[in-house]
Image: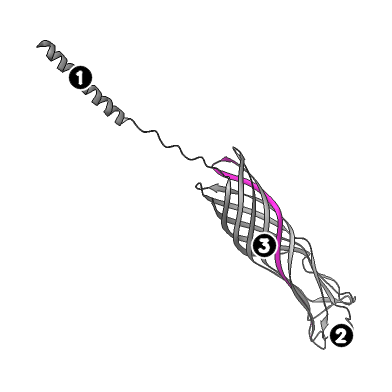
C-alpha cells in the first residue's frame, strides 16, 4: 500500500512539472522585432516650391550713330524677387555607411520679372527731356541636371553639396523713346524676344529621412547664366539722324533659389 501511494505521488509531481514547464514557456517574452535598416539608396520623385532672386549687372543701351551716349541700366546691379515651383526626380546610392552619391534632374516654373528705366538720356553731351530707355528680363522657367554628394552621419539627415548644368528660359524686351516737347515728333525703338540660356548651377542643402520612403529637404541653389543676349532695333519712323539701329544687351545674369522639397523614395 505504501508503494502504491509513493507511485501515485511521483506521477502527480511529474504531471505538475510538465504543466509548469509549459506555463513558463508561454510566459517567456518574445524577442522585439528588428527595426528595418534605413538606406538612402533608391529612386525618388517629388515636388518643390520656394523663393528666387534674379540679378543682372550689365544691361546696356548703345547708339552706334554716336548721337546718344551709352546708358548702363544695370551698373549698380538690381535684384528682383519672385517665386518658383516644380518637380524633381533622382537616384541616390549609399556607397559607405555615412556617404551618399546621387544624380538629380529638376524643372521649376518661375515668376521672376526685372524691369529698369534710364531717363533722361544724354544727347550730344546734354541731358534731353522726355527721353528714356526701358529694359526688362522675365524668367519663365529653370531646369538643371546635377550631381550630389552627401554625408548622413547625424540625426538621420543628409547634408549635401550639389552642382551641374542649368538652363533658363527668359523673355526680353526693350524700348527707347523720344517724345515731345524734347522732340517735334514721337519716335521709338522697340524689341522683344525669348531665349533659352545655358550655364551652371551649384548649391547645397539638408535632407531628412522622415520615414523609409519620405524625404524632406531645405535647399539653396545658385544659377550662373552669364552668356549675354543682344538685339538691334531701328527707330520708327526712322529719322535721318539715326540710320543705324540701337543696340540692347543683357549680360552677367544669375538667379538664386531657396526652396523646400518633399520626395517619395521607392
Q: Are marks 1 and 2 in contact (CB under 8 Å)?
A: no
Residue 258, image x and y in percent?
Answer: 62, 56
**Residue 166 among magenta residues:** yes
Q: Secondary structure at mark 1?
A: helix
Q: Is residue 147 above or below residue 18?
A: below
**Residue 98 among magenta residues:** no
**Which residue is tagged 1?**
13
Residue 29, image x and y in percent?
Answer: 35, 32
At horizontal 63% and vertical 58% (from top left) the residue drawn is 106
Q: Is residue 246 above or below residue 39?
A: below
Magenta residues, start to end: 152-180
> How many discs appear?
3
Q: Nearer the viewer, mark 2 or mark 3?
A: 3
Magenta: main secondary structure equals strand
Marks 1 and 2, the one that precedes in the sequence: 1
Determine which of the numbered discs, if any, sits on residue 142 in the image: 3
Q: Is residue 258 above or below residue 2?
A: below
Determine which of the numbered discs, if any, sits on residue 239 in the image: 2
At horizontal 57% and vertical 52% (from top left) the residue drawn is 44
Residue count near mark 3 (Cα–Cα under 10 Å), binned few <14, some 14–19, many ≥20:
many
Foreground residue, 154 or 239?
A: 154
Q: Nearer the viewer, mark 3 or mark 1?
A: 1
Amino acid at each position: 500500500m505504501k508503494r502504491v501511494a509513493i507511485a501515485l505521488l511521483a506521477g502527480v509531481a511529474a504531471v505538475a512539472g510538465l504543466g509548469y514547464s509549459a506555463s513558463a514557456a508561454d510566459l517567456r517574452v518574445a524577442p522585439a522585432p528588428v527595426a528595418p535598416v534605413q538606406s538612402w539608396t533608391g529612386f525618388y520623385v517629388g515636388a518643390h516650391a520656394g523663393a528666387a532672386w534674379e540679378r543682372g549687372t550689365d544691361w546696356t543701351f548703345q547708339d552706334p550713330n554716336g548721337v546718344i551716349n551709352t546708358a548702363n541700366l544695370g551698373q549698380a546691379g538690381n535684384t528682383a524677387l519672385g517665386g518658383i515651383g516644380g518637380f524633381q526626380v533622382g537616384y541616390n546610392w549609399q556607397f559607405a555607411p555615412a556617404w551618399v552619391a546621387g544624380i538629380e534632374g529638376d524643372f521649376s516654373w518661375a515668376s521672376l520679372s526685372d524691369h529698369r528705366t534710364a531717363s533722361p538720356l544724354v544727347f550730344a553731351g546734354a541731358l534731353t527731356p522726355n527721353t528714356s530707355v526701358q529694359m526688362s528680363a522675365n524668367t519663365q522657367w529653370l531646369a538643371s541636371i546635377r550631381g550630389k554628394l552627401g554625408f548622413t552621419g547625424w540625426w538621420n539627415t543628409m547634408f549635401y553639396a550639389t552642382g551641374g548644368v542649368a538652363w533658363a528660359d527668359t523673355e526680353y524686351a526693350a524700348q527707347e523713346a523720344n517724345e515731345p516737347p524734347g522732340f517735334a515728333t514721337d519716335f521709338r525703338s522697340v524689341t522683344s524676344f525669348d531665349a533659352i540660356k545655358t550655364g551652371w548651377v551649384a548649391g547645397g542643402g539638408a535632407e531628412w529621412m522622415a520615414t523609409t520612403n519620405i524625404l524632406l529637404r531645405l535647399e539653396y541653389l545658385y544659377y550662373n547664366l552669364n552668356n549675354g543676349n543682344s538685339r538691334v532695333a531701328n527707330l520708327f519712323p526712322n529719322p535721318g539722324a539715326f540710320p543705324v539701329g540701337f543696340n540692347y544687351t543683357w549680360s552677367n545674369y544669375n538667379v538664386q533659389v531657396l526652396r523646400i522639397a518633399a520626395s517619395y523614395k521607392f
